[in-house]
Image (cartoon, helix red, strand yellow):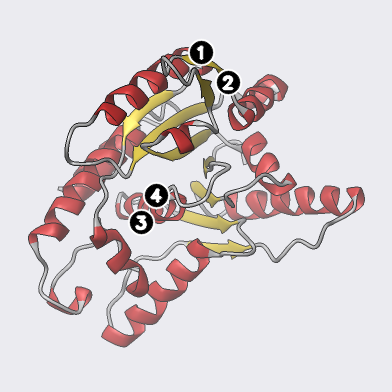
Amino acid sequence: MSSTRVIVVANEKGGSGKSTVAMHLAIALIKSGERVATIDLDARQKSLTHFIENRRAWARQIDRDLETPEHFSFGKLHHPSAQDETAGCNALTDAIDALGRRCGVIVIDTPGHDNYLMRRAHALANILITPLNDSFVDLDVLGTVDPKTFEVTGTSHYAQMVQVTRRQRHPDQGSLAWIVLRNRLSTLSSRNHVVVGKGLQELSRWLDFRCVEGLAERMIFRELYPRGLTAVDDIDDITLGTRPTMSHVTARLEMQNLLGCILLGDARSNAAPATYSQAMV
């Protein structure tokens, strides 16, 4: 597993765009020439699993070869005992080891709540990507703010878990690179946007993460999901099932910029950013 990059997309809050980011990242890396596997740890929602199933079904329907990662999904957890938790963590480690023998990158999507598999995934990650909606509700998983001044006053539960995970890493694992994506950004400037941004910049210094502007609030990302398509796919009338619009072009450029920021920050491999840039031209 030492030569395999493990990218974990996680946040202890639902609705932040984790599965969308995970799927787009996986497809973009495949297009760059990487062999990619995905793991879905959200045993209840299974959004990434359904995304991939939709993609395979749509590819058969339109008789097109749509690049798809090798995929593994965990089953539902039933209030496990300590022994079950140990077995589950070992199963995740074994799955990563097995997939790592065939793939250079493994992208893991996590549930929007804390559980032992999510924590284990953090411990095994090389890169952690945390999508975060541009609001104080989502900021609360990283830090606390003063209700009068909106100044950051401390770190919160999810950030504290990540910091503990970093401290407990074995030296052979190297450091955990952490990227926070500001998702659901409004196209109009607002006081909320400025104040949340200021809080994130302060927390980035406290917690050592890189803050990247993510995706705007665009309906197109929801419309692509039933067919398993992504904004980085080569979309034409047949692949899309309808005529592409300017919304598809805008979403593609936005996602290219976002993924470029993520991959260019990956110090573990200089090849991936270059080949990604070439593949997306």
In the picture, the quarter occupied by the N terminus is top right
* Residue nearest the viewer, comparing 260 with 163: 163
Residue on which the image places disc 1: 206
- Relative to 49, is 213 on the left or the right? left
179, above or below 34, in the image = above
Disc 2 packing (10 Å; few <14; some 14–19; many ≥20): some
**Mark 4, secondary structure of its residue:** helix
Label 4 vs 2, first from the N-terminus:
4
Dot 1 and dot 3 residues touching (CB under 8 Å): no
Dot 3 and dot 4 residues touching (CB under 8 Å): no
* Residue nearest the viewer, comparing 139 with 148: 148
Q: Is residue 264 visible?
A: no
Label 3 vs 2, first from the N-terminus:
3
Work out how far the residue at label 3 is from the one at label 4, CA to CA, in angstroms: 10 Å
Q: Quadrant of residue 188?
A: top left
* Residue nearest the viewer, comparing 255 with 35: 255
* Residue nearest the viewer, comparing 111 with 66: 111
Label 1 vs 3, first from the N-terminus:
3
